Amino acid sequence: DKLGEENVEAVKKGLENLGQHIANIHKFGVPPVVGINQFIADTDAEIAVVNDYCKSLETDCFVCSHWADGGAGTQEIAARIAEIADSGVAKFKTLYDDDLSLWEKIRTISKEIYGADDATADTAVMKQIEQYEADGYGKFPVCMAKTQYSFSANPDLKGAPSGFSVPVREVRLSA
């Protein structure tokens, strides 16, 4: 409710979340690049905090103004991403082997990406996963969706929380 007011401390609190995203990108063997989606009310001090944090993690950071300038507001970051892609420095790897069971893939994503202790599911979900594997879909990749507001399933847990389990409430096959 106070987005129009400078709040460097709030930005600093959000850096824990950004740091988890940066760490996650590294897990895939790809150098992260951060784009600050700058809005008119963002202050130089707020942007400096994010830039400094990214520098401390040896991560490229660009201020982007695509909300105001369209594609022209992202040319610098796009050029850097293209440079990285063409350089051969990225050594992409998946988070898990295709041969892991679907449940182990879900657990791996929960632990490695979300920072959870584990994943949980009721009997009906586990039976559905078993059926997908029995039907020959066990080597498929897993795509997970959850709240965008937290690494946990609880939108009120901000930053990079720990000590939680990811509740898997349903599974769907896209084949």
Image (cartoon, rainbow, N blue to C red):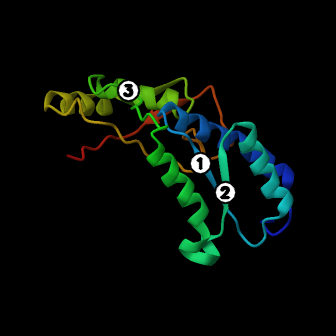
Binning the other alpha carbons within 10 Å of mark 1 as few (below 14), some (14 to 19) or many (20 upward) gives some
Please report whichever mark, 3 or 2, sits nearer to the chain's N-terminal start: 2
Structural distance between the alpha carbons of marks 1 and 2: 8 Å
Mark 1 vs mark 2: which is more N-terminal? 1
Compared with 76, 123 (above or below) is above
Disc 2 marks a residue whose amino acid type is Phe
Percent position of residue 68, x then y: 64, 77
Residue at position x 58%, y 28% in the image: 164
Task: Tell me the distance, in whole angstroms, between the alpha carbons under discs 3 and 2.
Answer: 31 Å
Residue 87 visible at all? yes
Q: Is residue 146 visible?
A: no
Q: Amino acid at mark 3?
A: Tyr
Q: Which residue is mark 3?
A: 96
At mark 3, the secondary structure is loop
Seen from the viewer's position, the closer of residues 50 and 17 is: 50
Mark 1 touches mark 2? (CB < 8 Å): yes
- The answer to which image quadrant residue 117 occupies is top right
Numbered circle sitting on residue 62:
2
Q: Nearer the viewer, mark 3 or mark 1?
A: 1
Q: CA distance from mark 3 to mark 1?
A: 23 Å
Above or below, 4 relative to 24? below
Image point 86% across, 62% down: which residue? Answer: 6
User: Residue at the location (57% across, 38% down)?
Assistant: 152
For the residues carrying marks 3 and 2, which lies nearer the camera in this image? 2
Q: Which residue reaches farthest bottom?
A: 69
Asked whether the residues under the numbered discs 3 and 2 touch, taking CB atoms below 8 Å apart as contact, a structural biologist would say no
- Residue 10: image location, x then y, percent: 81, 51
**Residue 35 x %, y %:** 63, 56
Secondary structure found at label 1? strand
Q: Position of residue 108 (x, y in %)?
A: 44, 26
